[in-house]
């Protein structure tokens, strides 16, 4: 269960959020479950009553990227792709002989 300190609750009660702010607040509460892969972006969006792309855009608006991939991981993926493409091309050439 969520444990919110009294001072925070008092502040929140005195400063209610508009609809967009409340939606962002709820989305941020769900984010750790997405990050831990307990729920998907799609399921979180369903809980919030919005579509998945809107949720992804909402997260991106506060600096939370949809993909958590480092530049090094992207380079590795590109290298794997290029190696597989080269193998595939060699197989095609050898199959024509």
Image (cartoon, grey):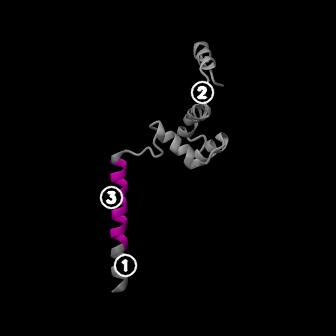
Q: Which residue is at a point 35% across and 70% down the rendered structure image?
A: 87
Q: Which residue is mark 2?
A: 17
Q: Is 85 rendered above or below residue 10?
A: below
Which type of secondary structure does the marked residue at label 3 adopt?
A: helix
**x then y, percent, for residue 84:** 37, 65
Which type of secondary structure does the marked residue at label 1 adopt?
A: helix
Q: Which residue is at a point 44% across and 37% down the rendered structure image?
A: 63
* Quarter of the N terminus within the rendering: top right
Residue 37 on the magenta segment: no
Q: Earlier in the sequence, mark 1 or mark 2?
A: 2
Q: CA distance from mark 3 to mark 2?
A: 47 Å
Q: Mark 3: few, some, or many residues within 10 Å (few <14, many ≥20)? A: few
The image's mark for residue 79 is 3
Q: Mark 2: few, some, or many residues within 10 Å (few <14, many ≥20)? A: few
Q: CA distance from mark 1 to mark 2?
A: 61 Å
Q: Which residue is mark 1?
A: 92
Q: Is residue 1 left or right of residue 82?
A: right
Q: CA distance from mark 1 to mark 3?
A: 20 Å
Q: Does the residue at mark 3 contact the one at mark 2 (Cβ under 8 Å)?
A: no
Q: Does the residue at mark 1 contact the one at mark 2 (Cβ under 8 Å)?
A: no
Q: Earlier in the sequence, mark 3 or mark 2?
A: 2
- Residue furthest to the bottom in view is 97
Q: Does the residue at mark 1 contact the one at mark 3 (Cβ under 8 Å)?
A: no
Q: Mark 1: few, some, or many residues within 10 Å (few <14, many ≥20)? A: few
Q: Quadrant of residue 92?
A: bottom left
Q: Is residue 86 left or right of residue 9?
A: left
């Amino acid at each position: 269960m969520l444990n919110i300190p009294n001072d925070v609750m008092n502040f929140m009660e005195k400063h209610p959020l508009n609809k967009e702010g409340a939606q962002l607040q709820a989305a941020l509460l769900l984010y750790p479950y997405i990050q831990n892969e307990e729920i998907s972006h799609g399921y979180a969006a369903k809980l919030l009553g919005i579509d998945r792309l809107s949720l992804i855009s909402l997260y991106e608006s506060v600096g939370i990227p949809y993909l958590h991939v480092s530049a090094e991981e992207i380079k590795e993926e590109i290298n794997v792709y290029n190696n597989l493409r080269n193998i595939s091309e060699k197989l095609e050439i050898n199959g024509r002989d």
